[in-house]
Structure formats: structure tokens, C-alpha cells
């Protein structure tokens, strides 16, 4: 991938980032997206043909948490974390996506590689759709499997809708 990451991001996502209170800063070929006050920062960059997403809090150094061949899984993951923040700031009930190892979305399988990273594949394929830094029982790669195949416009609308419509209604928590 060449050129600015910002130029490759879907325009609807870039506009939504701004509406949800995050800021974005281009740093050469990389992009940093930060919450209000910069306490939480996500960096997107390309390395060895893969798109890497890093995360840092406050004065911490960024740590790579996600690796993918395309931007789609990166955008989907950011929609889930920013969407959760947006729903909380608007007083909306949280969306609680499944997260246990035995709960990937239909059509996906999850496994760990030898270095402990979690890998998500489409069922019947050896190709890794996305890899995320290792965790124990609770894992965001499982949650991510539920939004990867949702059209971006529907994913954004679902995080803005009180009911989670059109695509995430069944995951809206009745508990706040």
C-alpha cells in the first residue's frame, strides 16, 4: 500500500471519526487517531505489506495490537471501539458482541499462532483475515468477527442507533 493511509480510508469513516469526538493527525505515511485529550491513541501504518494498528494510552509507547492485509479489519475494529465510546457518551445502551474463543461469528474460525497472536480466518480458508495481539479467554478478534462482514454504513448506523439497528440489535445490552 502506497500513499497516505488517510487517502485510503473510507470517507464515511473519516467523517464519523470526527463526529464521534476523535481527532486524526497524519504523520507521513501513518495516521494517528486520538480521543478527546489524546489519552488514547490508535496509529495506522504499513509495514512489510501489512497494515498495522497500534494502541497507546497517555505517555505510553504504542504497541501493535492488530495486523491485516487490507484496511477493512482495521476500520471495523476502530468502529467497534469508537462506537462503544460514542454510545456511552450519548447515554445509549452498550453493544455487547460475543468474545469467547468458542463464539466466533458464523463463517469464521479463530486460532492462536506460535507467538500467541490470535488469528481469524474464514471457515475453510488458510488465509488470515486479521491477527490480533494475544489475550486469554476474552478476545476482541472474536467480537471483530461479528462486524467484519457488515457494510460500513450499516455498522456506523448500528452504533448510532439506540436499538442497534440495522445490524446489531440482538447485541444491544439491556443493562447499562
Image: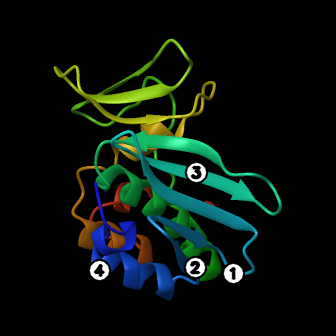
Indicate the secondary structure of the residue bearing disc 4: helix
| Residue highlighted by disc 4 | 11
Residue 161 seen in render: no
**Disc 3 to disc 1, C-alpha distance:** 18 Å
Residue plotted at (29% across, 80% down): 11
**Closer to us: 93 or 141:** 141
Q: Which mark is residue 36?
A: 1
Q: Which circle's residue, 4 or 1, is located before the other in the chain? A: 4
> From what the image shows, is residue 87 above or below residue 137?
below
Label 4, residues with CA under 10 Å away: few <14, some 14-19, many ≥20: few
Residue 89 vertical position relative to residue 98 in the rendered view, above or below: below
Could you tell me which secondary element the residue under label 3 belongs to?
A: strand
| Extreme-left residue of the structure | 124
Identify the element where label 1 is drawn. Answer: loop
Judge left or right: residue 71 versus residue 58.
left
Q: Which residue is mark 2?
A: 22
Relative to residue 68, is residue 150 drawn left or right? left
The residue pinned by badge 3 equals 54
Placement of the N terminus among the 4 image quadrants:
bottom left
Circles 4 and 2: CB atoms closer than 8 Å: no
Give the mark nearer the N terminus: 3 vs 2: 2
Q: Residue at x 39, y 85 (%)?
A: 15
x, y percent for residue 142: 44, 36
Are discs 3 and 2 less than 8 Å apart at CB?
Answer: no
Residues at circles 3 and 4 in contact by the CB criterion of under 8 Å: no
Amino acid at each position: 500500500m502506497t500513499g497516505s493511509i488517510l487517502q485510503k480510508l473510507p470517507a464515511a469513516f473519516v467523517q464519523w471519526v470526527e463526529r464521534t469526538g476523535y481527532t486524526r493527525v497524519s504523520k507521513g505515511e501513518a495516521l494517528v487517531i486520538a480521543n478527546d485529550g489524546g489519552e488514547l491513541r490508535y496509529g495506522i501504518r504499513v509495514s512489510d505489506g501489512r497494515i498495522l494498528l497500534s494502541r497507546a494510552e497517555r505517555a505510553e509507547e504504542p504497541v501493535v495490537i492488530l495486523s491485516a492485509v487490507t484496511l477493512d479489519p482495521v476500520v471495523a475494529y476502530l468502529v467497534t471501539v469508537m462506537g462503544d465510546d460514542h454510545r456511552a457518551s450519548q447515554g445509549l445502551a452498550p453493544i455487547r458482541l460475543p468474545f469467547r474463543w468458542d463464539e466466533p461469528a458464523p463463517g469464521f474460525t479463530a486460532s492462536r499462532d506460535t507467538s500467541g497472536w490470535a488469528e481469524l480466518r474464514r471457515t475453510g480458508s488458510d488465509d488470515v483475515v486479521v491477527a490480533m495481539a494475544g489475550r486469554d479467554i476474552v478476545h476482541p478478534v472474536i467480537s471483530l468477527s461479528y462486524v467484519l462482514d457488515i457494510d460500513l454504513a450499516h455498522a456506523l448506523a448500528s452504533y448510532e442507533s439506540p436499538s442497534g439497528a440495522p445490524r446489531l440489535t440482538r447485541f444491544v445490552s439491556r443493562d447499562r
